[in-house]
Amino acid sequence: MSEFSGQEPLLLKKENDFDYLNKTPLWISSTKLILNVLMWVIFIAWATFLFLLPSAYMNELQKKFIRETQGTIFGKTGSKFLIFSFPVFMIAFLAIIRLVLSGKDESQVKKTANKGPSFRLWTFPVLVDGPFGVVTAAEMIGVILFSVYIIWAVIMYSIRSVDRLSSLHVQDMKEKSAMLLELTGRRFGFIGLTCLAFLFIPVARGSVLLRAIDIPFEHATRYHVWLGHTTMALFSLHGLFYVIGWAMRGCLVEELIEWKNVGIAHLPGVISLAAGLLMWVTSLPGVRRKKFELFLYTHQLYVVFVVFLALHVGDFIFMMVGAGIFLFMLDRFLRFFQSRKTVDILSATCFPCGTIELVLSKPANLHYNALGWIFLQIRELSWLQWHPFSVSSSPLDGKHHVAILIKVLGDWTEKLKGHILNLSVEQPEMEPLLLHNRILTASVEGPYGHESPYHLTYENLILVAGGIGISPFLAILSDILHRINDSRHCLPRNILIVWAIKNSDELPLLETIEMEAICPLYSDKLNLEIQTFVTRESQPSLEEGKRAKTMHTSISPGFSGCRMSSLAGTGNVVWSGLYVIISTIGLVIIVALLDIFYINPFNVTYWWYKGLLLIGCMAASVVIFGGLVIALWHLWERKTSLKEEPEDTTKKVDMLQQHEASLQKNLEEARSVNTIRYGERPDFQEIFGSHAKSWGSVDIGVIVCGPPTLQSSVAKECRRQNLQRRGHQAIFHFNSHSFDL
């Protein structure tokens, strides 16, 4: 353990010297509280309605509301919009206002050290093994509530189906069984639509809804996976019950190809279900891991799934799921514009362990935190493949660049490494301009990630990494050192990094952070300890430090003015908020004009046609109204970038040239706090137990980034320590920072 582990860091002894202890203005905190209450009230009321909808009483109440409100120009579609979609849009609008206020709040990192340790539902792991991975208490509550809803809905709808069948006085048992199957299939379809209302929200990467409750995209994808399996299971039962019922009647083929003008059109439903089943099968874990590209490309069938679903059910039933799909469309359209822009790769470095560091150019007004992710495309390698990578640099390292670490594991990364090595051989012989024309062309989506930097809210941190999982922790450590040096928002004072690697050639990854340069005499201000476990070597294979000096390759083509676009859902809060609000208002306007000048005068009644028109209105509002906001946003971005202090490219090139010269120094610097153990694996019980005793009665934030087995091991130990806690012992808070599509 570090010799400073039992001492109080000097920097935190004078708490009144820190600007982050300033109180939030009363009007901001009060307004945020009111907005939070309103959002929760709306959500609880909406969720309660959905939960009780299968009951006969709530169903009659819904019918009564529709009868009272369908006299408007929007008809029954407008009534369904008010019930199912309007609450989601209201929560989104309130979330935008809250995010704007949070941007003005300079005290987002609250001091909690003196309050004592406490359990938190969202950081307490309950399930650590099984098909769901690590599941926290908060997630378990959500899973249980969703499961209870499905069971409740199936029971209530079954009772209603039996009652309705009894009222029809059908005598023929075969006909009665067929009708019961069809009624049951219809009910499964409605339950599936309820799940579908949530399905697209987690995959809107820059969604204001996710940002408001601080759920990052890498976590939200898990919920999308869970909802996807549930939704497709329900829709499969929906189709299966109908198919069996039609087969019993002897009219299977006729029903499957039927396309009604008024009522449910069967053939579009068959096409939609087929697309959904293809996406579902290729998304199963075994297929997804072995044939990732197949999974990725077949998932683009969501367009077919959604369009033919609208044709299947018509406009007013489709409005049950309209809000989530529309918010996803907005996010996808914005991502399209951001990803069109090419980005300068300021430097590319190949490490001996098969890891690549890319430094990308970004505008100063595009903010991110140390827990961020970006999606990267290299057009010289593939025009279709996008890969997620966590950032390895702190936003405080520089306003105009962001760094990522890429582990060479598959074909795409092998091609990238080969391309960089070829360019590094050619670089000395080529003019800079010619080299730049032949350099890699990158496109970026993001950055995404946590809305608030939760790593700054713990005084005590344990960061557990497996291999390339060290990448986000380099960003976290750099962020903390910068903040300590600048006396900015920062609580951590005890940090333990546990890093498990296969071979010692991965050790030079620690050299990418210059700790002493960032924060001189940081060891007097921060208790930092690094424990590295080299699992496949029993002893050092080379003299420490030589490997990095002899096997490191880099290129630095310079800067040509191509930065990442700030047209991102997680970009400027005001512009992204206006984009959502104006596009939504535009949707209402376009639908109103369509009803006034076409649907109502010409008495358009075809369900499938009105469903298609609704999809067209959604797309038109995104393109016309959303496109207008994006155009203005782009002009504002260009105007703002011209006013920015220009980046000193000479200084940047000099810095990159000096980087290689400082590698040996950085490695020696990291070794001063790094204990390397060969042929061992981390004993989390001993590590967590000893540090809990050393740090006392505190909250310990545990962040893990690595393979599922590592996450499970760490989560299991966090759960064990918390359940066996006695008196005033420490509480471990589990957080995961691993991305798995």
Image (cartoon, rainbow, N blue to C red):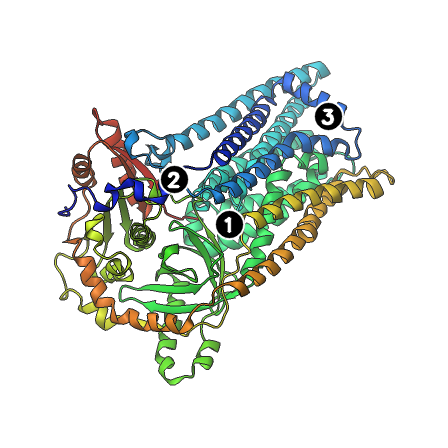
Q: Mark 3 against mark 1, which lies toward the viewer?
A: 1
Which amino acid type is marked by label 1? Thr
Which image quadrant for residue 325? top right
On the image, the x and y values in percent for residue 336 come to: 58, 57
Left or right, 75 with respect to 379, comes to: right
Tell me the element at label 2: loop
Residue located beneath label 2 in the image: 22
Residue 304 against residue 381 in the figure, above or below: above
Q: At 26% across and 67% down in the image, what residue appears? A: 352
Q: Earlier in the sequence, mark 2 or mark 1?
A: 2
As drawn, which residue projects farthest toward the bottom?
429
Closer to the camera in the image, 244 or 559: 559
- Kindly identify which numbered label has been placed on residue 218: none
Residue 469 against residue 591 in the figure, above or below: below
Q: At 55% across and 31% down in the image, what residue appears? A: 39
Closer to the camera in the image, 211 or 740: 211
On the image, the x and y values in percent for residue 128 come to: 32, 36
Closer to the camera in the image, 276 or 483: 483
Residue located beneath label 1 in the image: 570
Which amino acid type is marked by label 2? Asn
- Kindly identify which numbered label has been placed on residue 66: 3
Q: Are marks 3 and 1 in contact (CB under 8 Å)?
A: no
Crowding around mark 3 (Cα neighbors within 10 Å: few <14, some 14 to 19, many 20+) is: some
Q: Which of marks 3 and 2 is nearer the N terminus?
A: 2
Tell me the element at label 3: helix
Q: At 68% across and 17% down in the image, what residue appears? A: 164
On the image, the x and y values in percent for residue 612 come to: 73, 44
Which image quadrant for residue 311? top right
Residue 95 against residue 423 in the figure, above or below: above
Which amino acid type is marked by label 3? Ile
